[in-house]
Amino acid sequence: MPRPRFLDPTQRGLSQLGQEILPVLYRHRLLTAGQLTQLLRPAATSTRYIRRQLEVLHDRGLVDASVRRSSRAGELLWYTTALGCEVVESGGELAPRAYRMTEDAAASQLQEHTLAVNEVGLAFVQHARRLGDECGPLDWDPEVAHRLRDGDSRLGDEAFLVPDAVLRYIHTAPTGDGGRQRMLLTFFCEIDRTTMSIARLAAKLHAYARYVRYIPQPVLGRGRPKAGGYRQEAWRARYPSFPRILLVLDGASQGQLAKRTDDLRALVAADARLQPTATELKAGITTFKQLQQHGPFAPIVTPVVGDPEPTDVLLRPSATAASAA
Protein backbone atom coordinates (compact mmCIF):
# COMPACT_ATOMS: atom_id res chain seq x y z
CA MET A 1 0.00 0.00 0.00
CA PRO A 2 1.47 3.39 -0.95
CA ARG A 3 2.18 5.83 1.85
CA PRO A 4 -0.29 8.71 2.18
CA ARG A 5 0.72 12.04 0.73
CA PHE A 6 1.40 14.40 3.64
CA LEU A 7 0.03 17.83 2.93
CA ASP A 8 0.81 21.16 4.48
CA PRO A 9 -1.65 21.92 7.31
CA THR A 10 -3.08 24.91 5.43
CA GLN A 11 -3.96 22.57 2.54
CA ARG A 12 -5.94 20.46 4.97
CA GLY A 13 -8.31 23.33 5.71
CA LEU A 14 -7.11 23.84 9.27
CA SER A 15 -7.69 27.06 11.15
CA GLN A 16 -4.81 29.20 12.42
CA LEU A 17 -5.31 27.75 15.88
CA GLY A 18 -5.29 24.21 14.52
CA GLN A 19 -1.95 24.94 12.89
CA GLU A 20 -0.61 26.28 16.19
CA ILE A 21 -1.75 23.23 18.15
CA LEU A 22 0.10 20.67 16.03
CA PRO A 23 3.72 21.76 16.67
CA VAL A 24 3.03 22.35 20.36
CA LEU A 25 1.66 18.82 20.76
CA TYR A 26 4.54 17.44 18.69
CA ARG A 27 7.17 19.03 20.91
CA HIS A 28 5.56 18.46 24.30
CA ARG A 29 4.22 14.96 23.64
CA LEU A 30 1.12 14.99 25.85
CA LEU A 31 -1.10 17.92 26.84
CA THR A 32 -4.58 18.51 28.21
CA ALA A 33 -7.04 20.85 26.52
CA GLY A 34 -6.63 23.10 29.54
CA GLN A 35 -2.88 23.32 29.13
CA LEU A 36 -3.24 24.03 25.41
CA THR A 37 -5.75 26.77 26.16
CA GLN A 38 -3.42 28.45 28.67
CA LEU A 39 -0.52 28.22 26.24
CA LEU A 40 -2.25 29.32 23.04
CA ARG A 41 -5.38 31.24 24.04
CA PRO A 42 -4.74 32.50 27.59
CA ALA A 43 -7.59 35.01 27.45
CA ALA A 44 -10.18 32.29 26.79
CA THR A 45 -12.63 31.59 29.60
CA SER A 46 -13.16 27.94 28.64
CA THR A 47 -11.47 25.15 26.70
CA ARG A 48 -14.38 24.85 24.25
CA TYR A 49 -12.65 26.38 21.23
CA ILE A 50 -9.45 24.39 21.75
CA ARG A 51 -11.45 21.18 22.12
CA ARG A 52 -13.33 21.93 18.90
CA GLN A 53 -10.03 22.35 17.06
CA LEU A 54 -8.70 19.13 18.57
CA GLU A 55 -11.76 17.32 17.25
CA VAL A 56 -11.06 18.67 13.76
CA LEU A 57 -7.43 17.55 13.99
CA HIS A 58 -8.60 14.16 15.25
CA ASP A 59 -11.03 13.77 12.35
CA ARG A 60 -8.12 14.36 9.97
CA GLY A 61 -5.99 11.74 11.70
CA LEU A 62 -3.43 14.28 12.94
CA VAL A 63 -3.97 13.90 16.68
CA ASP A 64 -5.32 11.29 19.05
CA ALA A 65 -6.12 11.14 22.74
CA SER A 66 -5.74 8.87 25.72
CA VAL A 67 -7.76 8.92 28.93
CA ARG A 68 -5.88 10.30 31.92
CA ARG A 69 -5.28 7.46 34.35
CA SER A 70 -5.77 9.62 37.45
CA SER A 71 -8.98 11.25 36.22
CA ARG A 72 -12.35 9.92 37.32
CA ALA A 73 -14.04 12.25 34.84
CA GLY A 74 -12.22 10.70 31.88
CA GLU A 75 -10.07 13.74 31.03
CA LEU A 76 -8.36 13.37 27.64
CA LEU A 77 -4.65 13.79 27.02
CA TRP A 78 -3.79 14.75 23.45
CA TYR A 79 -0.81 13.86 21.26
CA THR A 80 0.19 13.92 17.60
CA THR A 81 -0.25 10.77 15.54
CA ALA A 82 2.39 9.48 13.12
CA LEU A 83 0.62 11.44 10.38
CA GLY A 84 0.58 14.57 12.54
CA CYS A 85 4.31 14.18 13.20
CA GLU A 86 4.95 13.92 9.45
CA VAL A 87 2.99 17.11 8.83
CA VAL A 88 4.94 19.04 11.48
CA GLU A 89 8.30 17.72 10.30
CA SER A 90 7.53 18.50 6.67
CA GLY A 91 6.98 22.15 7.66
CA GLY A 92 10.65 22.43 8.62
CA GLU A 93 10.05 24.84 11.52
CA LEU A 94 10.89 22.36 14.28
CA ALA A 95 13.85 20.03 14.44
CA PRO A 96 12.61 16.44 13.99
CA ARG A 97 12.65 14.36 17.16
CA ALA A 98 13.42 10.67 17.24
CA TYR A 99 10.83 10.09 19.97
CA ARG A 100 7.19 9.90 18.94
CA MET A 101 4.25 9.44 21.24
CA THR A 102 2.36 6.21 20.65
CA GLU A 103 -0.98 4.95 21.86
CA ASP A 104 0.70 2.69 24.42
CA ALA A 105 3.05 5.42 25.67
CA ALA A 106 0.20 7.92 25.96
CA ALA A 107 -1.69 5.49 28.19
CA SER A 108 1.34 4.53 30.32
CA GLN A 109 2.35 5.50 33.83
CA LEU A 110 4.49 8.30 32.36
CA GLN A 111 1.38 10.43 31.86
CA GLU A 112 1.67 12.43 35.08
CA HIS A 113 5.39 13.06 34.77
CA THR A 114 4.99 14.32 31.19
CA LEU A 115 2.16 16.61 32.25
CA ALA A 116 4.19 17.86 35.23
CA VAL A 117 7.12 18.81 32.99
CA ASN A 118 4.72 20.76 30.81
CA GLU A 119 3.18 22.44 33.86
CA VAL A 120 6.63 23.77 34.77
CA GLY A 121 7.08 25.11 31.24
CA LEU A 122 3.62 26.65 31.41
CA ALA A 123 4.49 28.40 34.70
CA PHE A 124 7.46 30.08 33.02
CA VAL A 125 5.30 31.09 30.04
CA GLN A 126 2.64 32.66 32.26
CA HIS A 127 5.13 34.69 34.29
CA ALA A 128 6.95 35.82 31.14
CA ARG A 129 3.65 37.29 29.94
CA ARG A 130 3.17 39.16 33.21
CA LEU A 131 6.73 40.52 33.20
CA GLY A 132 6.89 41.39 29.52
CA ASP A 133 9.60 38.76 28.99
CA GLU A 134 9.80 36.14 26.27
CA CYS A 135 9.07 32.48 26.86
CA GLY A 136 6.53 30.91 24.56
CA PRO A 137 4.75 27.60 23.98
CA LEU A 138 7.73 26.15 22.10
CA ASP A 139 10.51 27.42 24.37
CA TRP A 140 11.18 24.20 26.24
CA ASP A 141 12.29 20.84 24.90
CA PRO A 142 11.66 17.60 26.81
CA GLU A 143 14.44 15.06 27.28
CA VAL A 144 17.26 16.50 25.20
CA ALA A 145 20.23 14.12 25.23
CA HIS A 146 23.70 15.50 26.04
CA ARG A 147 26.66 13.17 25.67
CA LEU A 148 28.92 13.20 28.71
CA ARG A 149 31.15 10.22 28.08
CA ASP A 150 33.17 9.00 25.13
CA GLY A 151 32.65 5.49 23.86
CA ASP A 152 29.71 3.19 23.35
CA SER A 153 26.32 4.96 23.22
CA ARG A 154 24.71 1.75 24.50
CA LEU A 155 25.93 2.66 27.96
CA GLY A 156 22.70 4.64 28.32
CA ASP A 157 22.67 6.72 31.50
CA GLU A 158 26.43 6.44 31.72
CA ALA A 159 26.91 8.00 28.28
CA PHE A 160 24.21 10.69 28.24
CA LEU A 161 22.70 13.37 30.41
CA VAL A 162 18.97 13.76 29.68
CA PRO A 163 17.29 16.62 31.58
CA ASP A 164 13.51 16.46 31.91
CA ALA A 165 13.47 19.70 29.91
CA VAL A 166 15.77 22.38 28.56
CA LEU A 167 13.97 25.73 28.84
CA ARG A 168 14.93 29.04 27.22
CA TYR A 169 13.82 32.38 28.64
CA ILE A 170 14.60 35.93 27.49
CA HIS A 171 14.49 38.42 30.33
CA THR A 172 14.45 42.18 29.82
CA ALA A 173 16.12 44.00 32.69
CA PRO A 174 16.83 47.70 33.32
CA THR A 175 20.41 48.91 33.01
CA GLY A 176 22.14 51.57 35.08
CA ASP A 177 21.90 54.17 32.32
CA GLY A 178 18.12 53.95 32.05
CA GLY A 179 18.11 51.51 29.14
CA ARG A 180 17.05 47.90 29.02
CA GLN A 181 19.06 44.77 28.31
CA ARG A 182 17.76 41.51 26.87
CA MET A 183 19.37 38.43 28.37
CA LEU A 184 19.02 34.80 27.42
CA LEU A 185 18.64 32.40 30.34
CA THR A 186 18.75 28.66 29.86
CA PHE A 187 17.56 26.13 32.42
CA PHE A 188 18.07 22.42 32.86
CA CYS A 189 14.80 21.46 34.56
CA GLU A 190 14.35 18.32 36.64
CA ILE A 191 10.88 17.53 38.00
CA ASP A 192 10.38 15.16 40.91
CA ARG A 193 6.86 14.30 42.08
CA THR A 194 8.27 12.50 45.13
CA THR A 195 8.68 9.37 43.04
CA MET A 196 12.49 9.31 42.98
CA SER A 197 14.81 8.44 45.84
CA ILE A 198 17.11 11.15 47.17
CA ALA A 199 20.03 9.03 45.95
CA ARG A 200 18.66 9.11 42.42
CA LEU A 201 18.28 12.89 42.55
CA ALA A 202 21.89 13.12 43.72
CA ALA A 203 22.90 10.83 40.83
CA LYS A 204 21.37 13.34 38.43
CA LEU A 205 23.55 16.05 39.95
CA HIS A 206 26.55 13.77 39.39
CA ALA A 207 25.63 13.63 35.70
CA TYR A 208 25.55 17.43 35.53
CA ALA A 209 28.90 17.58 37.33
CA ARG A 210 30.40 15.28 34.69
CA TYR A 211 28.84 17.25 31.85
CA VAL A 212 30.14 20.65 33.01
CA ARG A 213 33.71 19.34 32.60
CA TYR A 214 33.26 16.83 29.78
CA ILE A 215 35.60 17.45 26.84
CA PRO A 216 34.82 15.04 23.98
CA GLN A 217 37.69 13.25 22.31
CA PRO A 218 37.73 12.52 18.56
CA VAL A 219 38.38 8.87 17.81
CA LEU A 220 40.29 6.94 15.21
CA GLY A 221 39.36 3.50 14.00
CA ARG A 222 38.05 0.95 16.49
CA GLY A 223 37.23 3.64 19.02
CA ARG A 224 40.82 4.59 19.84
CA PRO A 225 41.12 8.23 21.01
CA LYS A 226 42.98 10.57 18.71
CA ALA A 227 46.05 12.26 20.14
CA GLY A 228 45.51 15.86 21.15
CA GLY A 229 41.72 15.83 21.24
CA TYR A 230 39.45 18.83 21.67
CA ARG A 231 40.22 21.77 23.92
CA GLN A 232 36.82 22.87 25.22
CA GLU A 233 33.86 21.41 27.07
CA ALA A 234 31.03 19.97 25.01
CA TRP A 235 28.39 22.29 26.48
CA ARG A 236 30.10 25.36 24.98
CA ALA A 237 29.02 24.27 21.49
CA ARG A 238 25.35 24.41 22.58
CA TYR A 239 25.04 27.14 25.21
CA PRO A 240 26.55 30.62 25.72
CA SER A 241 26.98 29.78 29.42
CA PHE A 242 26.33 26.64 31.41
CA PRO A 243 22.56 26.43 32.06
CA ARG A 244 21.13 26.87 35.52
CA ILE A 245 19.90 23.63 37.08
CA LEU A 246 16.43 23.87 38.59
CA LEU A 247 15.00 20.95 40.57
CA VAL A 248 11.25 21.34 40.95
CA LEU A 249 9.57 19.25 43.67
CA ASP A 250 5.88 18.36 43.82
CA GLY A 251 3.56 15.57 44.89
CA ALA A 252 3.65 16.04 48.68
CA SER A 253 2.94 18.63 51.37
CA GLN A 254 5.17 21.69 51.62
CA GLY A 255 6.57 20.33 54.87
CA GLN A 256 7.50 17.02 53.29
CA LEU A 257 9.08 18.78 50.33
CA ALA A 258 11.11 20.96 52.69
CA LYS A 259 12.47 17.81 54.39
CA ARG A 260 13.24 16.36 50.97
CA THR A 261 15.18 19.50 50.11
CA ASP A 262 17.17 19.25 53.36
CA ASP A 263 17.93 15.57 52.75
CA LEU A 264 19.23 16.24 49.25
CA ARG A 265 21.41 19.10 50.44
CA ALA A 266 22.83 16.92 53.22
CA LEU A 267 23.61 14.10 50.80
CA VAL A 268 25.36 16.48 48.40
CA ALA A 269 27.34 18.08 51.24
CA ALA A 270 28.62 14.65 52.30
CA ASP A 271 29.51 13.59 48.74
CA ALA A 272 33.21 14.18 48.14
CA ARG A 273 32.80 13.39 44.43
CA LEU A 274 30.51 16.39 43.92
CA GLN A 275 32.53 18.98 45.82
CA PRO A 276 35.14 19.74 43.10
CA THR A 277 32.42 20.85 40.67
CA ALA A 278 29.79 22.10 43.13
CA THR A 279 30.79 25.73 42.68
CA GLU A 280 30.60 25.39 38.88
CA LEU A 281 26.98 24.25 38.98
CA LYS A 282 24.37 26.93 39.56
CA ALA A 283 21.84 24.50 40.99
CA GLY A 284 18.84 25.01 43.23
CA ILE A 285 15.63 23.45 44.49
CA THR A 286 12.12 24.86 44.60
CA THR A 287 8.58 23.54 44.62
CA PHE A 288 6.07 23.70 41.81
CA LYS A 289 3.64 25.59 44.02
CA GLN A 290 6.21 28.32 44.71
CA LEU A 291 7.20 28.56 41.05
CA GLN A 292 3.59 28.80 39.96
CA GLN A 293 2.58 31.34 42.61
CA HIS A 294 5.62 33.61 42.76
CA GLY A 295 7.35 33.23 39.41
CA PRO A 296 10.93 32.50 38.41
CA PHE A 297 12.52 35.69 39.80
CA ALA A 298 11.24 35.51 43.38
CA PRO A 299 13.40 34.27 46.29
CA ILE A 300 12.02 30.74 46.08
CA VAL A 301 15.12 28.66 45.28
CA THR A 302 17.19 26.86 47.91
CA PRO A 303 20.77 26.38 46.69
CA VAL A 304 21.88 22.76 46.50
CA VAL A 305 25.24 23.77 48.01
CA GLY A 306 25.97 26.46 50.59
CA ASP A 307 23.59 28.78 52.43
CA PRO A 308 20.18 27.09 52.93
CA GLU A 309 18.30 30.40 52.77
CA PRO A 310 15.94 30.56 49.75
CA THR A 311 17.18 33.08 47.21
CA ASP A 312 16.53 34.44 43.75
CA VAL A 313 20.20 34.43 42.77
CA LEU A 314 19.97 31.17 40.83
CA LEU A 315 17.24 32.53 38.58
CA ARG A 316 18.18 36.20 38.50
CA PRO A 317 20.11 37.24 35.37
CA SER A 318 23.67 38.19 36.20
CA ALA A 319 25.62 41.09 34.80
CA THR A 320 27.56 38.67 32.63
CA ALA A 321 24.49 36.93 31.21
CA ALA A 322 24.62 36.45 27.46
CA SER A 323 22.84 39.08 25.42
CA ALA A 324 20.01 37.78 23.29
CA ALA A 325 20.47 40.32 20.54
Image (cartoon, rainbow, N blue to C red):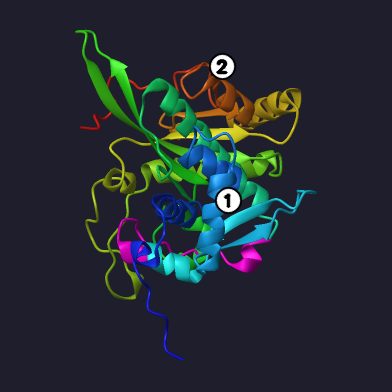
Provide the residue span drawn in magenta.
Answer: 89-107
Instruction: Please give the name of the residue rendered at 71% of the width and 53% of the height, measured from the top-left corner.
Output: 68
Q: Secondary structure at mark 1?
A: helix
> Is disc 1 surrounded by few (<14), some (14 to 19) or many (20+) residues within 10 Å?
some
Counting from the top left corner in percent of width and height, residue 154 is at 49, 68
Q: Nearer the viewer, residue 272 or 249?
A: 249
Residues under numbered marks 1 and 2 in contact, where contact means CB atoms less than 8 Å apart: no
Q: Secondary structure at mark 2?
A: loop
Residue 152 visible within the image? no
Vertical comparison of 26 with 290: above or below: below
Spatial CA distance of label 1 from label 2 is 40 Å
Counting from the top left corner in percent of width and height, residue 87 is at 39, 66
Counting from the top left corner in percent of width and height, residue 211 is at 41, 45
Q: Nearer the viewer, residue 45 or 284?
A: 45
- Quarter location, residue 108: bottom right
Of labels 1 and 2, earlier in sequence is 1
Amino acid type of the residue tagged 1 in the rendering: Arg
Q: Is residue 91 magenta?
A: yes
The residue carrying mark 2 is 310
Q: Is residue 22 magenta?
A: no
Q: Is residue 70 left or right of residue 41?
A: right
The residue carrying mark 1 is 51
Instruction: Please give the name of the residue rendered at 42% of the width and 27% of the height, measured from the top-left corner.
Output: 129
Which of the two discs, 1 and 2, sits closer to the camera? Answer: 1
Vertical comparison of 208 with 282: above or below: below
Residue 267 visible within the image? yes
Q: Is residue 233 left or right of residue 162?
A: left
Amino acid type of the residue tagged 2 in the rendering: Pro
